[in-house]
Image (cartoon, grey):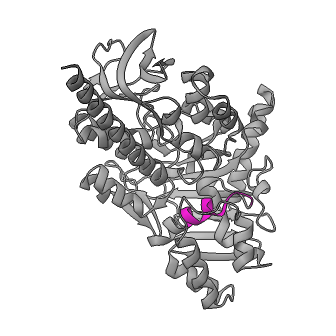
Amino acid sequence: MLYKAKDKITKSYDVIVIGSGLAGMTAANKMAKDGLSVLLLEAHNKLGGFATWFYRNKKDHVFDISLHGFPFGMKKTCRKYWNKNIAEHIVQLKDVRFHNPQYKIQSTFTREDFTEKLINHFKIEKQTVDAFYDYVESMNFYDNQDMTNRDLFHKFFPDRIDVVRFLMEPIVYANGSTLDDPAITYGIVFSNFMSKGVYTFKGGTDVIIKMMREQLLENGVDIKMHSKVEKLLIENQTVKGVMLKGEPIHAKSVLSNANLRTTILKMAGEEHFSPNFIDKTKAVRMNSSSCQVYMGVRPGETIPHIGDLVFTSTHPKFDSEALVGFDITSRTFSVYYPEGRPYDESPRYAIVSSTNAKYEDWNKLSEEEYKKAKEQMIEETLVCLENYIPDIRSKLDFVEAATPKTVKKFVHHEQGSSFGTKFEGLEISMGLHHQVKGLFHAGSVGIIMSGWLGAANYGVIQSNEISSYLYNLENNKEQEDQVHV
């Protein structure tokens, strides 16, 4: 059932899920289908977490916050853990463009096409290209983490900074990784995308989240929004539920889809964990954040096809620091054409410019400095876009900017992180229930688990852990009851 904001919850559950990002929703849906009683609590007024949207100009415009592209595997995940209808809305983006001082390339973003570009444009031997693909496709979570992305590229493409840019830059936009992060943070994500290209959800984020909400309710998940959990109820190193608006809600287990550090250090409390675990938690680094400029094309106006995703940069070479720099040199344009987001009334177009960024760069500004920086970012974005659509200013009737502070305000991500934590967060996330029984975590952690596909699949992984925990809990109880008899 869908609780109202004023409703008081008096029943207890097998599982309480805190936060309705894609990991939380997918886990809740799977566990409910498996027969568990599930309560999904969301702090905001709609589900989705960072997978969200907003309307402007009396719904003349709708903008997706993070729906810019994900691997083909999302189709399989949605078909298996949601439903066929949701999966059938996932369609391929076939026109991905790269424009920078080193090259201008148009691609379908598939292994076949990238292989052709590496051989014919970059003049790399086919044997080397095949060896690189075979190597990254064999990577998994249990590999040695000593190899960095820098080491990986040096192994196959020494001194080819143009090739590094071609292979690395689009993945940085997908998960925030750098050359010094473990190579598996790149290899696994790159292999996922290279399977069959880049995909998106036809209709937009608002459509997919509403479809998912209907599926959750149909499968018996109880949902309550406007519900920010204050504390976890923990007794004898075992989770017993949550505190919501001063009232306890009891459950046999809890899955937090909130920020990893927030879950441990604030909602649970340091006293429930070993000193070593707390030290490791505090050492977990947040990943980078992002800025966006949202541009709405006036109803009735049209724009030419300039590509589905356009990776642009004026920086002379690939540079992880420059990609998150306050002085923006690189941005990705996600273009929404009428066929991708149909309107009943008339064809509509929208463009979203995305740029990786650092929270601290924006957080240190005064109110006046912050306002001017946003205005400058908008102006520089329009200047860049004029290279592709010279008369774009005359076609727009809405422009708005978001920064890492916007992310933190609306999604509650620590430091406004768009990509969760760095790789060391994965160990902490997966080990949570070994510290406090019945307490689990899922979300954007470890870079690998960021993005739509990674988050959804991590929700599935952790839902299986919870089901196993509850099964053992019930078996142990039955054995105790038999002993007492």
Please give left or right for residue 286 compared with residue 395 in the image: right
Q: Quadrant of residue 365?
A: top right
| Residue range (magenta) | 180-190
Would residue 209 be visible to someone looking at this image? Answer: no
Q: Residue 167 in the image: x percent, y percent?
A: 64, 71
Which of 101 and 190 lies nearest the eye of the viewer?
Answer: 190
Please give left or right for residue 16 compared with residue 381 in the image: left
Taking the spot 33% from the left edge, 54% from the top edge, the residue there is 78
Which of 54 and 109 lies nearest the eye of the viewer?
Answer: 109
Q: Residue 87 in the image: x percent, y percent?
A: 31, 57
Quadrant (top left, top right, bottom left, bottom right) of the C terminus: top left
Quadrant (top left, top right, bottom left, bottom right) of the N terminus: top left
Q: Is residue 109 above or below residue 251?
A: below
Verify whether residue 19 appears in magenta: no
Q: Residue 292 in the image: x percent, y percent?
A: 62, 46
Spot the residue most to the left.
485
Would residue 485 be visible to someone looking at this image? Answer: yes
Main SS, magenta region, reads helix
Q: Residue 278 in the image: x percent, y percent?
A: 66, 31
